[in-house]
Image (cartoon, rainbow, N blue to C red):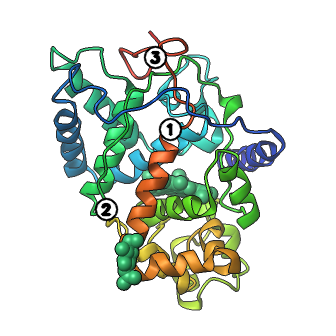
Amino acid sequence: MIRMEKRLQLFLLSFTLSLLVSSPPGAAAVQLDPNYYANICPNLENLVRGAVVKMMSQTPVAAPATLRLFFHDCFVMGCDASIMIMSSDGSDEWHNPADFSLKAEGFETVLAAKAAVDGDLQCTNKVSCADILALATRDVVSLSGGPTWPVELGRYDGKVSLGSDVVLPSPDFNLDQLNGMFGSFGLTQTDMIALSGGHTIGASSCMFFYNRLYPGDPTVSPGFLLQLQQSCPNPLLDPNAFAFLDAATPLQFDNAYFRNLQQGMGLLNSDQVLFNDPRSQGTVNLFASNQSAFFSAFVDAMTRLGRLGTKTAVDGEIRRDCRFVN
Ligand code: HEM
Ligand SMILES: *[C@@H]1O[C@H](CO)[C@@H](O)[C@H](O)[C@H]1NC(C)=O
């Protein structure tokens, strides 16, 4: 319990600090291309998808964990798989409390896909972990019932991963804070709302929303509040307690997340605020009533997210093992 409190303190501290540090602009450094590997590794997309299908059949955590991994990678030092680098001294991104809760299944999905790709002699050590993560992310979304889209490719893997660089949004953010952080990466409010729709799959540990339960946040619907209080009787005593981000269809990539928000059933404050703030409510209502509109905005936003801070042969490499720089 002491450890948990410590972790929570670190977690809150890191978000407070993150507000003080200016985030780097995420301008694209290379021209990405969906056909980048057409001659280098023609079977790439099938190899990745095969590994993803297998992982998803083994555990329902693979899909949400991979999607969240991609987001956390792209927001810190760009989409360069720096989130996957493990340093023996614990100075890497993953050891930052804001990333430490990333589930192993996301890393395992990318490692399995990388092994499948490298098993094809034409492809061995020619496809970046960053691109494999981007492809695996598209696949977990579409295999969960979401949209599919051509993934832009040609990223190199970063060589630097520092926990001190980690700047990520807090679940306690209000709309201005969310827009401020996403805006610093050139993403619009609509992009931010569509990307938040990633919370249509997966779960959150109680520690990220327990402050809304005791005393009850009036913007949480009364029935949902009771349900959450039962799931999270004392989050500090039970670090494993969790709730689904989309209580209606937690494994299905659909627009139920937005319909939940209309009913006061958003799990995190940063979710519910998208409906509660009149400046973003219209977009939530649109996505809640029209799933195609959500899917098309999500694809646009994921494509823009995927262009952040991409590396080239000059400042990157094709990592042999996604966990270590070459
Ligand atoms: C808008 C700001 C965001 C905030 C404040 C936020 C915060 C969180 C938090 C606190 C969790 C629970 C983590 C845990 O219990 O370990 C979570 C889970 C998750 N997030 Fe976000 N997130 C945001 C945006 C996004 C975006 C843009 C995506 C992807 C497009 C995303 C995808 C996910 C997924 C899929 C999960 C479930 C992970 C799992 O079940 O393993 N989130 N997020
Ligand atoms: C829903 O959104 C799609 C995609 O933006 C659009 O083409 C369609 O006309 C919308 N449908 C309705 C009923 O408004």
Q: Position of residue 71 (x, y in %)?
A: 51, 45
Q: Position of residue 96 (x, y in %)?
A: 64, 35
Circle 1 packing at 10 Å, graded few (<14), some (14-19), many (20+), is: many
Q: Is residue 35 above or below residue 159?
A: below
Question: Which label belongs to residue 307?
Answer: 1
Q: Quadrant of residue 120?
A: top left
Q: Which residue is mark 2?
A: 146
In the image, 5: left or right of 284?
A: right
Q: Which residue is mark 3?
A: 324
In the image, 108: left or right of 182?
A: left
The kind of residue on which mark 1 rests is: Arg
- Residue at position x 43%, y 83% in the image: 289
Q: Position of residue 18 (x, y in %)?
A: 76, 43
Q: Along the polypeptide, which appears first: circle 2 or circle 3?
A: 2
Q: Quick one: 34 or 119, which is closer to the camera? A: 34
- Residue at position x 76%, y 63% in the image: 176
Q: Secondary structure at mark 3?
A: loop
What's the distance in space between the residues labelled 3 and 1, CA to CA?
A: 23 Å
